[in-house]
Image (cartoon, helix red, strand yellow):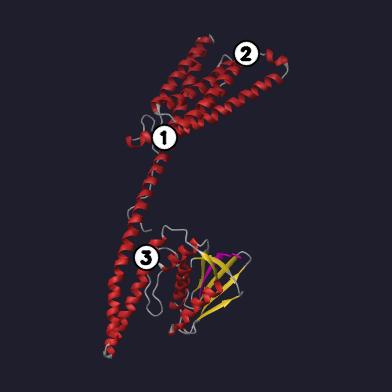
Amino acid sequence: MYFSTFVSPITHNLETHFLRSLPGKYKIAYRDYYTKQNLFAVRTCSLIFFIINVLLRLLVWIIPESLTKADNFPEFSFTNWIYLIITPFFYWGSILLIKRLKKKRKADMVMIFFVFLFSFYIIMCGMYSSFIATSDPRNALTIYLSALCVISVLCVFEYDEAIILLILTEAVFTALLFYSRADATEMLYNQIISVILLCGFYMISRYFFSYKASYYQQIVEIRVQNIEIEKATIFKNQVLGMVAHDLRNPIGAVESIAMMMELEEVNEDTLDNISMIKESCVKARSIIGDLLEAARNENRNVVETEKIELNVFLKNLVDAWKIQKDFKSNVVFISTSQKMYALINSEKFQRVIDNLISNALKFSKDTDKVLVNLDQTRSEISIKIQDQGMGIPQDMLPHLFESFSKAGREGLRGEKSTGLGLSIVKQIVESHRGTIKVESIEGKGTTFTITLPQIV
């Protein structure tokens, strides 16, 4: 909310990079990013491919001997052994290169070439398997097509690398067609099919490149904006704390002068003016306290706590409110048990209770009571601050705990609100591993319930 004026939303449409790379400021960083992802893909894919070939070899040993005399079985058996020998080199190579990349944090040509070589290897395996199944690959394209799909989805290439891969693949495919001694018509049909498949491979590959590039750019921009927000938050808190702290001295001086003037013999009108000055100083110090507390609590989730007996703690706070002549009989403490312990920071938690009681009195009539109710279950302690005042409109409830909330209202006696009090209360309660919720009915009152972990 506070930063909405300078943080623009990230809206990226998917740009397809069919014949171009990313802009210069992203290109190198993105290459490092996708090379790492490629190496992980090589490691996983090579392991799966090796396991598949191991299972095929086991099947060969299990199935009847008569089936091993089928056409092209010798070629299948030979290539299966080749895959079993070569594939582990890619697996262990990917592991070594991943370690190297984590250490260097920079991709190099060896890593890029390694991924390219593995991709070419998988495509060749699929292609040759199609030729083994039948000399006319039009009738057995499943393996070749699967290999192309796997590589296009798992591995990211620059457009020039993808084009080189296509050219090499088509060259090998043509060579295999000549090797299989297919007639001219079959060669033409097979070439057309191969070109269609390779075009599809290129389109899918570039689409995934574009999709992952768009995702990467968004991640980078989110990180940049998070850094800017963090810097702005630190700067804001520094300024807020500095201004609030520096305001204390002049307000304290004004209050001191007012108190000194009060000791002198002055007429009734002047005395009323002095009282107004003192009340304004008290309000100003309260606002400054809220600002300082907001600046301190914003990035702090852990507080120093100690074991406190809550009956004594809350009763002392309620008694302090009763000392004030205006609220002598308004604040009532009720407890269901003699001993209840919780880990709290007494100074901060006093601020929570005081803030909630102050709010309850602010929106209650002079004759209304404010109940501070302490209760427990087996594992939790609940503290309820309940009033019989004017209540809170339902549309304000979701915004009640926001910083600088628009839900802030004047009290029945004209008390001003900074919109920070309940936000600070929520921060402090959550830093104690507790929760706070509110229930309210207009015209009937409001109940704030704090829940804390109970200790023995």
Q: Which residue is mark 2?
A: 72
| Picture quadrant where residue 69 is located | top right
Q: Which residue is mark 3?
A: 292
Label 2 crowding class (10 Å Cα cut-off): few <14, some 14-19, many 20+? some
Question: Disc 1 and disc 2: Cα gap in Å?
Answer: 47 Å
Q: Nearer the viewer, mark 2 or mark 3?
A: 3
Can residue 394 be seen by looking at this rendering? no
From the viewer's perspective, is 271 left or right of 375?
A: left
Q: Quadrant of the N terminus?
A: bottom left
Which contiguous range is marked in magenta? 444-456
Which secondary structure lies at badge 1? loop
Residue 187 % position (x, y): 50, 13
Question: Disc 2 and disc 3: Cα gap in Å?
Answer: 82 Å
Query: CB of mark 1 within 8 Å of CB of mark 3?
Result: no
Viewer-closest of 298 and 440: 298
Q: Which residue is mark 1?
A: 105
Query: CB of mark 1 within 8 Å of CB of mark 2?
Result: no
Q: Nearer the viewer, mark 1 or mark 2?
A: 1
